[in-house]
Image (spheres, rainbow, N blue to C red):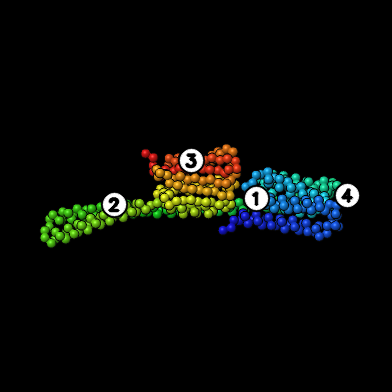
Amino acid sequence: MANPRINSIALLRYAGLFTWACVGLPLVVDADQQIGRGHYWAWLAAYLAFGLAYWLVSHEINRRKPKFLRLLLLTVMALTPAAISHFSQTGLSGVLLLVSAGVLPWLLPVLPGVAWLVAQSLLLVPIFAIREDYTVLLAFLQVALFFGYSSFTFVTSLVAKRQSEARDELRRLNSELRATRVLLAESSRANERVRISRELHDLMGHHLTALSLNLEVARHQTQGDAQAHVRQAQSLARLLLADVRQVVSTLRQDVAVDLGQALARLVEGFPGVKVQLALPDDVVVEDTERAQVLLRVAQEAITNAVRHGKAANIWIQFARQADGGIVVQAFDDGIGCAQAKAGNGLTGMAERLARFGGTLSFTSARGEGFRLRAVLPTEEPS
């Protein structure tokens, strides 16, 4: 299934490039009259620099690169429209400001984005003010007009970004709900098998034992052919009792929770990150509560990688220890941090593990992602 966020950004990128091409086309066709040979190369350099910066910055929306690179590209996109207006003596730079305004909500928080929008618009005031046919007041009015158009584009792009984030959050919550539903179904199945095994043991086992004892008494009180039939009935009763015990044992043993199915439902709903999951066949959980803890460990690892680490990939590995415990290791390719601290999510995860005698450890370094290791015993500590 395609990622709606990636589709939105791709549409934004190509729409901006189309607008950029339309701005430059009239000047390229009639460069001699519009610009003149003296300023043509300077205008062309500024025009191409804006297009290149926009192409790169639109790719930065989905990539996890340092912030200074984004700011550098945005600075180029703020300065080159002023240079284009100066060398071409036109107001076409105002159209390019619309293109810049469209990517600002995706790259900057709201307040810094608005400040950046105002600053790049004010850069045009001196460009218009020095022209003979403009006064300072007319320059401000012209820039105000461009700022109004840019503000509309900024708000529209901001709404689109928040809708995209809301869809992503809805998909994530839906995947968590489906994973939890799988665990509940597995828990109901396991509880039903235990209930049936208990009923078979308590009812049929009791009656068959009583029947066997009564046949034993009847065998001592009968003779001849009747005694042979009683012996045969007693043998069949013992075989039936053994079969019931075997069925009860089988029902109690086959109560493992299908953790793989729940994890598959979980990872398929996280947009913007590729989850590599390794779950060997020997990792079997019979306790539904422990399975829920393992599911929440994986969920929190993915959430941290997406929200805080800005990771594109995360690897989650399950393994069985020699003592029967289960180890979960998760690491991503996100931005990491200089000092890893436990927030509410990691603290809650550690508390869930500690309830069953488990442990949680994590490390991180700037530019090296985040690593997490959780150990969950499968038996109660003595």
Left or right: residue 253 versus residue 147 is left
Alpha carbon separation for disc pair 2 and 4: 103 Å
- For the N terminus, the quadrant is bottom right
Alpha carbon separation for disc pair 3 and 2: 42 Å
* Residue at x 59% of width, y 58% of height: 2
CA neighbours of label 2 inside 10 A, class few (<14), some (14 to 19), many (20+) = few
Q: Which residue carries the number 3 mark?
A: 360
**Foreground tag (3 vs 2):** 3
**Residue type highlighted by circle 1:** Ile
Q: Secondary structure at mark 4?
A: loop
Q: Which residue carries the number 1 mark?
A: 61
**Foreground tag (4 vs 1):** 1
**Residue type highlighted by circle 2:** Asp
- Decide if residue 335 is in sight here: yes
Left or right: residue 13 versus residue 32 is left
The disc, 4 or 3, on the residue closer to the chain's N-terminal end is: 4
Name the outermost residue toward the bottom.
Answer: 225
**Foreground tag (4 vs 3):** 3
Q: Position of residue 376 (x, y in %)?
A: 44, 43
Alpha carbon separation for disc pair 4 and 3: 70 Å
The disc, 1 or 2, on the residue closer to the chain's N-terminal end is: 1
* Residue at x 46% of width, y 48% of height: 318
Q: Secondary structure at mark 3?
A: strand
Q: Which residue carries the number 2 mark?
A: 202
Q: Secondary structure at mark 2?
A: helix
**Residue closest to the eye, 93 or 322:** 322
Alpha carbon separation for disc pair 3 and 1: 33 Å
* Residue at x 48% of width, y 43% of height: 374
CA neighbours of label 3 inside 10 A, class few (<14), some (14 to 19), many (20+) = many
